[in-house]
């Protein structure tokens, strides 16, 4: 609890903030999982029709699920967000130094 109090930002109940963050993560997982399940189910129904135009779209949508959930988790967690921003800054600096 002391660690949470030291790392907490802003005013408000830290316990409530922790629970809201967990609820956001679980809700985003549930929504993305349901979308992924619906896409996979519709793809399995449409697999018999090889001429269907939606097949590439369904592949792309089902491929986005894992990375979408990871991005949401990074944006919810302040420490992961800070590390991601630092990593992007380092990548930007390295790309700028590469001779073309």
Image: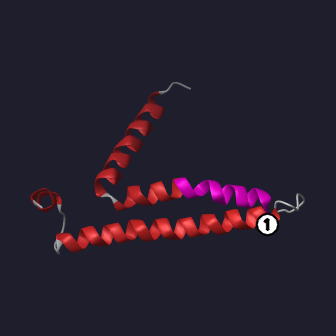
Q: Quadrant of the N terminus?
A: bottom left
Q: How is the image coloured?
A: secondary structure
Q: Where is residue 55 in the image (x, y as percent from the top left)?
A: 79, 59
Front one among 91 and 43? 43
Give me the residue at 23% from left, 74% from top.
Answer: 16
Q: In which quarter of the image is the C terminus?
A: top right
Left or right, 70 with respect to 100, comes to: left
**In this view of the protein, which residue sits in the foreground, 72 or 46?**
46
Q: Does the magenta stretch include residue 57?
A: yes
Query: Residue 46: x and y, percent?
Result: 81, 64
Q: Position of residue 6 (x, y in %)?
A: 11, 58
**Secondary structure at numbered mark 1:** helix
Residue at image coords 90%, 59%: 51
Residue 31 falls left or right of residue 43: left
Q: Name the residue under label 1.
A: 45
Q: Which residue lies furthest to the left in this view?
A: 2
Q: Quadrant of residue 61?
A: bottom right
Instruction: Identify whether 41 is placed above or below 97.
Output: below
Residue 4 shown left or right of residue 45 in the figure? left
Choose top left, top right, bottom left or bottom right for residue 7: bottom left
Relative vertical location of residue 86 with respect to residue 97 in this rendering, above or below: below
Predominant SS along the magenta part: helix
In the image, the segment drawn in magenta is: 54-66
Residue 29 located left or right of residue 2: right
């Amino acid at each position: 609890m002391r660690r949470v109090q030291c790392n907490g930002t802003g005013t408000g109940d830290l316990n409530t903030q922790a629970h809201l963050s967990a609820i956001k993560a679980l809700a985003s997982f549930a929504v993305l999982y349901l979308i992924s399940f619906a896409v996979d189910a519709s793809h399995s129904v449409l697999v018999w029709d090889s001429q269907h135009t939606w097949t590439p779209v369904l592949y792309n949508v089902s491929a986005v699920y894992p990375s979408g959930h990871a991005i949401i988790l990074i944006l919810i967690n302040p420490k992961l967000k800070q590390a991601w921003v630092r990593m992007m800054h380092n990548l930007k600096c390295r790309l700028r130094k590469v001779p073309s």
